[in-house]
Amino acid sequence: MTKTQGIDTLRIISFEHEFPVSYLYTLINTEKTRRSLSRLKQFKCKGNFLKRDLISLITEISHEISTFSLSLSDDFDQDLKTSQVSKFLKDQKKIKKLNVKPNNLVTPKYIRKVRTKTLLEIKLFEGNLDYMLENLLKCPNLRRICFCDSNLYKSQNLSKVVFPNLLDLEIINCNVFSSDDLSSPIIPFLIHNGKKIMNIRLSSISGNQIGFLLKISKKYCSSLVTLSVDIQDEPELEIFSKVLKRCRSLKVVDFGNKCKWQYFVNKNILYLNNISPRNLRKLRVRYWKVDIDVFKEFFENYGTFLNEFECSCTGEESDIRTLVINLVKGMNRNLVYLLIEEVEFQLIHLVKVRLN
């Protein structure tokens, strides 16, 4: 660290108490290291350790940070407070991406010190969401919002806020309506903001709420170009296929299971094979185990118009390679790139194809 001309990115993603709690502060608080960190652009800090002294030191050293990510826990009752996070943000002249997961000591009031004209992206968590949304109205250039771990149906301001330059929306592990009331403030939110939204990601959302979000996204997000979604059951698949069929602006689609391989998806693939959304240019099927015969039918259809295709496939690597090459020849297309990777312990290969 001391020999470098300058450090652009500092990530502390895990830190246990194998060292004294002041170890990180002591490590960084040297003349050469302070000089190296003066040009810091990205600072991401999470882990179960005291962060107060470290944040104070970085506040003193670095004023050009554009990406700041901070995850806090309630394990320490004498750690960072709102005022310290606020001071850190106040002293940063170029904050563009912000992700602060608060705790009992740090409240959302820190948002008041963010330089409103520079902020482009933010991740919002449960806890005084309305306060955050109200203050974000002062950020005219905000283009990406991620709602995470929140009960969105409880928000009063979600249905009212308008962000004129919002392009990207993520909803992760959220409830958009309650079991007692199917109305949701996310509907007026998309009515007000959906027209310009180009990229949507929906992940770790339970029950029929994915289907609900897909329906309203199809209705209110007419400029949608990229869609990433977890698909768990047949009703969700049916709605998803309608989105593929009717959203003519879609170019990039990423769907499937999340982080865990799912069996018995052949009928799902065959269901999607009934449509040919020729506006698509890139398709990724993740964590679905697909038999080679079904893969063949699927690629025969989608390979005729896609530029990039990614899907799993059973069988030997040599058989898969021969299959793809022969199918591409039959399509009169050029094979630019073919990668077949074995998935460890799964008896399956991941196939990545690029065509022109």
Image: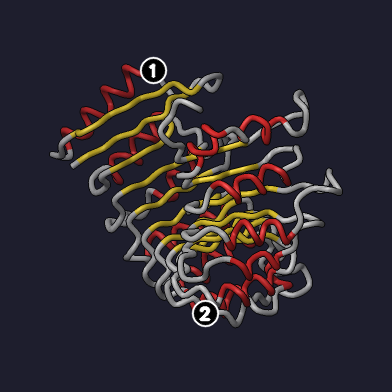
Left or right: residue 356 compared with residue 179: left
State which tag comes first along the sequence, 2 or 1. Answer: 2
Q: Position of residue 41 (x, y in %)?
A: 47, 47
Residue sitting at the far left: 332
Question: Looking at the picture, does residue 63 appear above or below residue 184?
Answer: above
| Residue kind at label 1, given as amino acid type | Glu
Q: Around disc 2, counting alpha carbons within 10 Å, would you say few (fewer than 14), some (14 to 19), or many (20 or more)?
A: many
Residue sitting at the far front: 31
Q: Secondary structure at mark 1?
A: loop
Residue drawn at the location 70% of the way across and 38% of the way down: 47
Q: Position of residue 284 (x, y in %)?
A: 40, 43
Q: Position of residue 23 (x, y in %)?
A: 71, 30
**Residue of label 1:** 316
Residue drawn at the location 56% of the way across and 38% of the way down: 11
Residue drawn at the location 83% of the way across and 43% of the way down: 75
In which quadrant will I find the C terminus? Answer: top left
**Residue of label 2:** 162
Question: Looking at the picture, does residue 331 appear above or below residue 220?
Answer: above
Q: Secondary structure at mark 2?
A: loop
Question: Looking at the picture, does residue 311 appear above or below residue 198?
Answer: above
Q: Quadrant of residue 46?
A: top right
